Image (cartoon, rainbow, N blue to C red):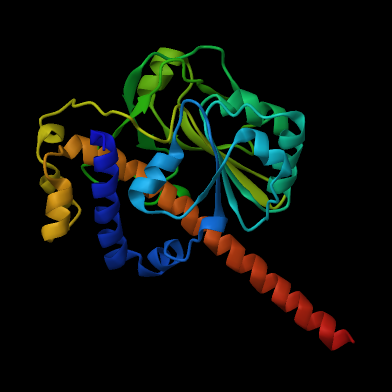
């Protein structure tokens, strides 16, 4: 297991403990997730499925070539790893999936290969590829539930940019909301967006620059070089024996970056589950009204 995979596992334990204290209902929604709820399309450069395996999140993995023929439901969350090389049939399927109510999560080169093709006019690649580096992130819209708890007091997470990551240019500023930004990214590559979202029909698209699987972190302050147990204390968590073992030999900075990434995805799961329950409630209500008319 790599250092960052270990950091993800430890951060998930911390996150669950914190959500148990502060967001019990949201945690219950996360725990409802089944393998069929999350479809991950394999990539060559990003490996979201590795993170899910470390976190113990149920999911189903398919190859890009299978997507055009795999049945999709509006109740699902579809994740497409970088590079997102899909054929025309799959692109059309993705477009319909979102319009029908599905949630789509994409990373890095999927910006050009999927989003520009399926949803033109929202976002695009600015043709200024990044270097292999990390950037400090901050939350732009703290009220958005998709980024709840991603960056809190004292937090200074940095996220990794794969070499040749695609900076995100927002085209439709009325419909596209920047969730996470980086001033460093803006200074170097003219675009500040780290993660964006927009709705299409009844569904939602969420995209982030670089890869969801943060393969490394970076220490910029003395605080980030402290032990991971210090980070647990900052979150108000007193680690039990098992968690202490998971935090062992990890730095605060490593767990902090993994924690922010894990919280971001947990929020996406929660919002998807809430949307599905709303869809089911509306369907049940409509059915009840139709029966009364008969």
Q: Position of residue 126 (x, y in %)?
A: 56, 16
Q: Residue at x 9, y 37 (%)?
A: 226
- State the image coordinates of residue 55 (x, y, percent, origin top left): 35, 50
Above or below, 109 against 4 in this view is above
Residue 130 vertical position relative to residue 45 in the rendered view, above or below = above
Where in the figure is residue 52, as x and y percent of width and height? Answer: 40, 47
Answer whether residue 233 is visible to the viewer in this image.
no
Rendering quarter of residue 211: top left
Asked if residue 131 can be seen in this view, the reply is: yes
Q: Which residue is found at the position 64% from the left and 39% from the top?
A: 175
Q: Which picture quadrant has residue 15?
A: bottom left
Return the residue nearer the eye: 10 or 199.
Answer: 10
Name the quarter where the C terminus is drawn.
Answer: bottom right
Residue 172 percent coordinates (x, y)? 65, 31
Q: Is residue 208 left or right of residue 64?
A: left
Q: Residue furthest right?
A: 294
In the displayed structure image, the side of residue 78 where residue 239 appears, left or right: left
């Amino acid at each position: 297991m790599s250092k960052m995979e270990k950091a993800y596992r430890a951060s998930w334990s911390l996150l669950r403990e914190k959500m148990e204290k502060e967001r019990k209902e949201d945690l219950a929604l996360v725990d409802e997730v089944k393998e069929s709820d999350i479809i991950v399309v394999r990539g060559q450069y990003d490996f979201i499925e590795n993170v899910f395996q470390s976190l113990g999140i149920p999911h189903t993995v398919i190859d890009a070539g299978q997507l055009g023929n795999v049945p999709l439901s509006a109740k699902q969350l579809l994740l497409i790893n970088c590079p997102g090389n899909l054929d025309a049939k799959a692109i059309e399927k993705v477009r319909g999936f979102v319009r029908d109510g599905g949630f789509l999560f994409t990373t890095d080169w999927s910006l050009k290969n999927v989003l520009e093709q399926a949803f033109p006019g929202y976002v695009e690649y600015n043709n200024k590829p990044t270097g292999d580096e990390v950037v400090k992130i901050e939350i732009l819209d703290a009220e958005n539930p998709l980024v709840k708890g991603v960056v809190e007091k004292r937090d200074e997470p940095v996220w990794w940019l794969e070499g040749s990551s695609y900076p995100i240019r927002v085209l439709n500023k009325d419909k596209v909301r920047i969730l996470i930004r980086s001033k460093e990214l803006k200074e170097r590559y003219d675009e500040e967006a780290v993660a964006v979202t927009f709705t299409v029909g009844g569904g939602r698209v969420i995209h982030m620059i670089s890869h969801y699987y943060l393969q490394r972190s970076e220490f910029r302050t003395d605080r980030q070089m402290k032990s991971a147990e210090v980070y647990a204390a900052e979150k108000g968590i007193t680690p039990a024996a098992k968690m202490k073992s998971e935090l062992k030999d990890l730095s605060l900075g490593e767990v902090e970056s993994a924690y922010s990434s894990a919280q971001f995805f947990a929020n996406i799961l929660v919002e998807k589950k809430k949307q599905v329950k709303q869809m089911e409630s509306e369907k049940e209500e409509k059915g009840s009204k139709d029966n009364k008319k008969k």
